Image (cartoon, rainbow, N blue to C red):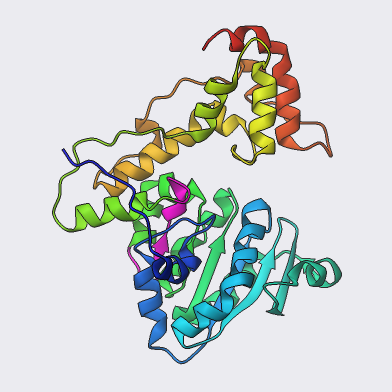
Amino acid sequence: QVCVQPLPLNLLQAHRAMLSRIMVAGSASQARLFAAGAGATRNLHVALVGRGLVGKAFLAQLCKQQQMLESQLGKAIELRCVTSSKKMLTGNISFCDWEKDFDANAVAMSMDQVVADLKAAGTQGVMVDCTASDDTAEVYPALIKSGVHVVTPNKRAGAGPLERYQACMAGPGIYMGEATVGAGLPIMSTLTSLVETGDKVHSIQGILSGTLSYLFNTCSATTPFSKAVAQAAELGFTEPDPREDLSGMDVQRKVTILARAAGLDVSADDVEVDSLVPAALQDWCPPAGQGIAPAVAEELKEVDGGRSGER
């Protein structure tokens, strides 16, 4: 049996890993990315898709570490695109002052343009996908086939259709999904390293959902289920839609990602889960203009008594 233990990165590794560590998620794969870019003369061309909580944290990290990273690489790191779901900003964008520029100059979002610009950059192109969108994951294979690298905490590719996942892993661009499992811990890179050096993984044990762990340890007579969900969302523990955590879908995806990294050709449907989402909320949509997380928490008040008692 192989036990997968998260190992701390030293300071130098942490800085060199930055592009592959959304939310400070270290990865051994960054060595391949930097090796791919270190010998070329062109600057790195970075496109951030998804300027939400995670995307903003990524850009704040780049703002602080850009000079050191560029010194390590021997080339400039250029932010050439930032997108939201509806708008995009292109050009030579500051990692530190991008928000004002985005608010003033963003135009209608075009994924076709994002893809075309990245393909033009070739092996010096890096898509950082901070969305939870399957539509974004759909463009990974074409980008990677053209030599572009993809760095993401988005689980949709790692746990989506097996054929698409295999296309992402085929190269020549590098797919880096360290942050899809374990957040800031180098779990995926450790597992990959074990498999690539000949170890056979018999089992993996751990808490696969920090969100559910938080909920189960927070629910009480004074903190009902709906309030615990609202708190978890406010703290940034949940997926954008908390139902992905409560349904078991997030755990299902993580198990699939880990199993594939361990060498198994599995699909998410092979992982059975029991949902905590009431039937009435499974296909429910929030009122227009209302945030999905607080709306879900509000609706869960209807089942507080039952859920709080299920611990």
* Residue 50 visible within the image: no
Relative placement, left or right, of 192 versus 2 is right
At 24% across and 57% down in the image, what residue appears?
193
At 50% across and 77% down in the image, what residue appears?
69
At 51% across and 52% down in the image, what residue appears?
153
* Residue 185 visible within the image: yes
Query: Magenta residues, as a range?
Result: 170-184
Relative placement, left or right, of 151 versus 226 is left
Relative placement, left or right, of 103 versus 89 is right
Is residue 177 found inside the magenta-colored segment of the image?
A: yes
Residue 173 at what x, y percent from top left? 40, 71
Residue 11 at what x, y percent from top left? 43, 66
Q: Quadrant of the N terminus?
A: top left
Q: Residue furthest bottom?
A: 41
Residue 176 at what x, y percent from top left? 42, 60
The correct choice, above or below, for 200 with respect to 62 in the image is: above
Q: Nearer the viewer, residue 26 or 175?
A: 26
The correct choice, above or below, for 151 with respect to 263 in the image is: below
> Is most of the magenta stretch helix, strand or loop?
loop
Q: Nearer the viewer, residue 174 or 53?
A: 53
